[in-house]
């Protein structure tokens, strides 16, 4: 006996399968905005990079905007116009940006970065932090090529954020067994730092250097002397000069580097929450960073380096 309910179910499935429905989704219209990026630091020339936003369905590089009006206003002072230039950037590639030969960034001074042109105007005001001098740096070998640092400085009473980086330059001699000839190799590089205190350890890299530095706030030592301990690996038997850099940075600088590092860390995880990279450009996108550097150079020779 034929099961009529079964047959009816089959016809219903066939009927549903034959129906095709299309849902049209109207994508929002993309209005281009300026993307403005620069890092204001006393003692360094200022370059403002200007590109434009792009729609979610556009698959192309961020091309530079060449015809924008870019200027930086110094509080209580003059306006400095910037001109578009092509120049040789990192790794010998050609970069494009807006530069000024006259502007000199000063600690404690407030600046307003303005960009006008074919897109809505963008503007950002930033105050350059004051320099926080390094009091002392202690270096100690812990075996192999591992080295630990103890950095001390006095933290001002207001809220502060710091980026700590280390780089070295030095040389190592090689003797060729074939003819006894001795050659010298010069080397310089930044290094990756690992915080010794769990309070400053992260699961992802932060910092603007090629290698990862430390990015911290002053919640644990606000207004007091700070001792930050960290470790790194240096090239064994290398005779060198080590430079420790303490950079007092703005909160925008700190938030941008933290969110950018977290985005890189979770980028390949389909289950991770999306991370919005911090932005401080009003009317556009991008980041205007600022910081003041204090450096300490220390001659350093590994205990096993003598005679090499």
Image (cartoon, helix red, strand yellow):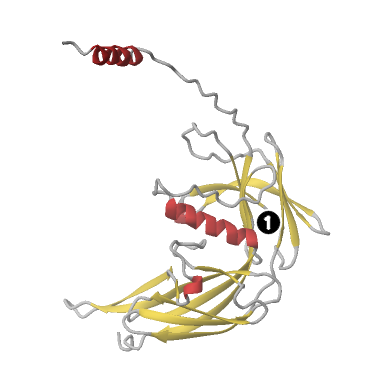
Residue at 71%, 68% in the rendered image: 107
Residue 302 location in percent, x, y?
A: 37, 85
How many discs mark residues in the rendered view?
Answer: 1
Q: In which quarter of the image is the C terminus?
A: bottom left
Depth check, front residue: 13 or 241: 13
Residue at 68%, 70% in the rendered image: 159
Image quadrant where residue 181 sits? bottom left
Depth check, front residue: 162 or 180: 162
The residue wearing badge 1 is: 101
Asked if residue 184 lies left or right of residue 134, the reply is: left
Asked if residue 90 lies left or right of residue 14, the reply is: right
Residue 112 location in percent, x, y?
A: 74, 53
Depth check, front residue: 140 or 97: 140
Quick check: can you spot residue 101? yes
Q: Which residue lies furthest to the front in this view?
A: 1
Image quadrant where residue 174 sits? bottom left
Q: Residue 96, relative to residue 173: is it above or below?
A: above
Quick check: can you spot residue 40? no
Residue 56 location in percent, x, y?
A: 51, 34
Depth check, front residue: 271 or 278: 271
Q: Residue 282, relative to residue 206: is it above or below?
A: above
Q: Quadrant of the N terminus?
A: top left
Residue 150 location in percent, x, y?
A: 50, 83
Crowding near pointer 1: few (<14 within 10 Å), some, many (20+)?
A: few
Image quadrant where residue 291 sits? bottom right
Label 1: state its secondary structure. Answer: loop
């Amino acid at each position: 006996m034929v099961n009529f309910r079964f047959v009816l179910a089959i016809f219903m499935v066939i009927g549903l399968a034959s129906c095709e429905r299309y849902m049209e989704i109207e994508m929002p219209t993309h209005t281009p905005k300026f993307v403005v990026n620069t890092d204001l630091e006393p003692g360094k020339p200022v370059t403002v990079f200007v590109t434009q936003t792009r729609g979610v369905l556009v698959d192309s590089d961020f091309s530079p905007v060449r015809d924008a009006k870019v200027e930086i206003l110094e509080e209580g002072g003059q306006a400095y116009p910037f001109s578009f230039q092509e120049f040789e950037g990192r790794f010998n590639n050609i970069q494009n940006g807006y530069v000024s030969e006259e502007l000199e960034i000063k600690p404690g001074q407030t600046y307003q970065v303005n960009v006008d042109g074919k897109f809505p105007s963008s503007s950002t005001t930033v105050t350059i932090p004051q320099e926080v001098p390094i009091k002392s740096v202690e270096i100690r070998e812990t075996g192999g090529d591992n080295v630990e640092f103890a950095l001390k400085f006095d933290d001002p009473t207001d809220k502060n954020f710091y980026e700590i980086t280390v780089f070295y330059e030095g040389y190592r001699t090689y003797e060729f067994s074939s003819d006894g000839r001795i050659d010298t190799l010069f080397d310089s590089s930044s290094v990756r730092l690992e915080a010794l205190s769990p309070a400053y350890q992260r699961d992802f890299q932060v910092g603007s250097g090629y290698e990862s530095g430390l990015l911290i706030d002053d919640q644990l030592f606000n207004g007091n002397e700070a001792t930050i301990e960290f470790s790194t690996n240096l090239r064994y038997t290398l005779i060198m000069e080590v430079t420790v850099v303490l950079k007092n940075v703005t909160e925008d600088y700190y938030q941008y580097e933290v969110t950018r590092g977290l985005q890189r860390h979770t980028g390949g995880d389909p289950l991770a929450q999306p991370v919005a990279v911090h932005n401080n450009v009003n009317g556009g996108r991008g980041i205007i960073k600022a910081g003041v550097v204090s450096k300490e150079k220390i001659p350093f020779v590994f205990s096993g380096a003598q005679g090499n």
